């Protein structure tokens, strides 16, 4: 065989390699034969196989992204990090205080997050274009609120440990003035405390001269899971002006992936429910059904989507059970399946890719944001950033900036590029802290 007739494949992604191995094994072929057979069938199946998207016409092409910097607050396992990095962003600061999430984050992105955000001086945070934050949702989530109420604890902003963290974001915004904010929380944030909580958050952002957009988005269009989250996107009016042409992704006509697509072929038996737990869940469901309410386990339709995976999934897995056939106990998601269900499948191709216990892994996935949702919204944000850049310069990416700098150097004395925060008088700081404590007691 001549050299021309041979080719070599490099950097095969792990899932593709696994598929190749499985296919070769199942068909009793070697991998080379599988690839050749595959190429041959593509060649002969149709004169013009639609394997690839048609190449965009040069004249219509626009760059999918621009270089930008972002920070990842309340980072968890980095749903924002994964998505915004894919869009060309460079992460310049991360904060996450949970040591297990830090471990996973470091193993995913090679970057150890800073700890408690309350301990970080906002001045020390590098400049950035996008501030991303999925601030803690427990004080606002339905489950979190009812748990806190039953324990006689404060919820919402009054929850001292976690309810105030939104205001920490405000502190950073005051000092750093990020042009764009991308915030994420549970759907219930919008209706918590009869809408007062959201009204306060919106007002705080608007009073800082941001245009505020908010929408509930269901991740079911990207992953086979019903997961509604409140996605808030804000644009600094001082940068983008008062009216910003931003739209959330259009989901009409999008199909939903099927739950069976995320299943492993050979899940470990340890994920099968014990007789004891399965009996308990069935009895519990029957008891509540008799009372006329719908609590109970969620047996997932393999051709549909699952319920929302929550941080409590590790307890009994009851919200997402996987049927194993008549007369057999169902099982819960494996760690690899949980990762896929949350859209982290590319980072977790085997159990070993998750450096923490099953309990911690489920908690981390249950708390995370689906990266594909952030990516879809991020693409729309980048369109706005690109438009703004085009309008603010002569349309060139570097040339416009270079000319602007030359003009600046010629006419203006050299100054630091970093904006200093407006100095606050002790009087205005006092007024601010009184306002904040009023809000927290609202
Ligand atoms: C709703 S989760 C965000 C998850 C994240 N978006 C992701 O994709 O994994 C909120 C995170 O904030 C972290 N957190 C809570 N209080 C914090 C604090 N004071 N400083 C830093 N992180 C904190 C929690 O440990 C949790 O991981």
Image (spheres, helix red, strand yellow):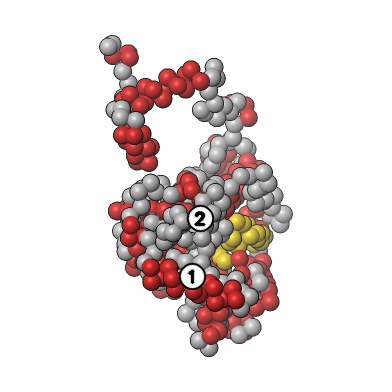
Q: Residue 350: where, in percent of width, then height? A: 33, 50
Residue 134's place in the image compared with 348, above or below, is below
Residue 111: mark: none
The first of marks 1 and 2 along the sequence is: 1
- Can residue 47 be seen in the rendering of this structure? yes
Q: Nearer the viewer, residue 90 or 136?
A: 136
Residue wearing tag 1: 282
Residue wearing tag 2: 370
Residue beneath the point at 35% across and 27% down = 34
Q: Quadrant of the N terminus?
A: top left
Residue beneath the point at 56% across and 79% down = 146
| Local SS, label 1 | helix
Q: Nearer the viewer, residue 193 or 69?
A: 193
Residue 35's place in the image compared with 407, above or below, is above
CB within 8 Å, label 1 to label 2: no
Q: Quadrant of the C terminus?
A: bottom right
Residue 104's place in the image compared with 33, above or below, is below
Q: CA distance from mark 1 to mark 2?
A: 30 Å
- Can residue 430 be seen in the rendering of this structure? no
Residue beneath the point at 30% across and 58% down = 355
Q: Is residue 99 left or right of residue 207?
A: left
């Amino acid at each position: 065989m001549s050299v021309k007739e041979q080719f070599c494949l490099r950097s095969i992604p792990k899932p593709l390699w696994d598929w190749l191995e499985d296919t070769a094994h199942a068909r009793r072929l070697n991998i080379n034969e599988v690839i050749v057979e595959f190429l041959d069938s593509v060649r002969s199946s149709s004169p013009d196989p639609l394997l690839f998207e048609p190449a965009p016409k040069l004249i219509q092409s626009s760059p999918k992204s621009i270089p930008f910097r972002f920070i990842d607050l309340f980072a968890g396992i980095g749903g924002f990090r994964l998505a915004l990095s894919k869009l060309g962003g460079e992460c310049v600061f991360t904060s996450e205080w949970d040591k297990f999430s830090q471990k996973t984050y470091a193993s995913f992105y090679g970057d150890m997050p800073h700890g408690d955000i309350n301990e970080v001086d906002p001045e020390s945070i590098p400049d950035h274009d996008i501030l991303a934050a999925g601030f803690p949702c427990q004080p606002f989530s339905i489950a979190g609120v009812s748990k806190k109420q039953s324990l006689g604890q404060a919820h919402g902003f009054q929850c001292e440990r976690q309810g105030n963290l939104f205001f920490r974001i405000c502190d950073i915004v005051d000092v750093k003035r990020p042009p764009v904010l991308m915030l994420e929380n549970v759907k219930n944030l919008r209706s918590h405390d009869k809408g007062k909580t959201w009204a306060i958050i919106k007002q705080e952002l608007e009073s800082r001269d941001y245009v505020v957009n908010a929408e509930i988005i269901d991740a079911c269009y990207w992953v086979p899971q019903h997961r509604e989250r409140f996605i808030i996107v804000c644009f600094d009016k001082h940068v983008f002006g008062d009216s910003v042409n931003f739209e959330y992704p259009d989901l009409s006509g999008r199909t939903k992936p099927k739950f069976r697509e995320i299943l492993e072929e050979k899940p470990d038996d340890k994920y099968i429910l014990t007789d004891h737990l399965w009996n308990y869940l069935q009895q519990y469901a029957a008891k509540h059904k008799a009372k006329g309410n719908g609590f109970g386990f969620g047996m997932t339709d393999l051709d549909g989507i699952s319920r929302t995976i929550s941080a409590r999934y590790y307890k009994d897995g009851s919200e997402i059970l996987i049927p194993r056939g008549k007369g057999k106990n169902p099982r819960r998601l494996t760690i690899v399946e949980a990762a896929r269900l949350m859209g982290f499948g590319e980072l977790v191709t085997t159990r070993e890719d998750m450096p923490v216990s099953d309990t911690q892994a489920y908690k981390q996935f249950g708390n995370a944001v689906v990266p594909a949702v952030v990516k879809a919204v991020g693409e729309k944000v980048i369109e706005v950033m690109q438009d703004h850049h085009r309008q603010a310069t002569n349309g060139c990416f570097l040339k416009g900036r270079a000319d602007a700098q030359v003009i600046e150097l010629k006419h203006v004395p050299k100054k630091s590029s970093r904006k200093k925060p407006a100095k606050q008088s002790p009087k205005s700081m006092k007024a601010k802290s009184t306002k904040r404590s009023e809000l927290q007691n609202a």
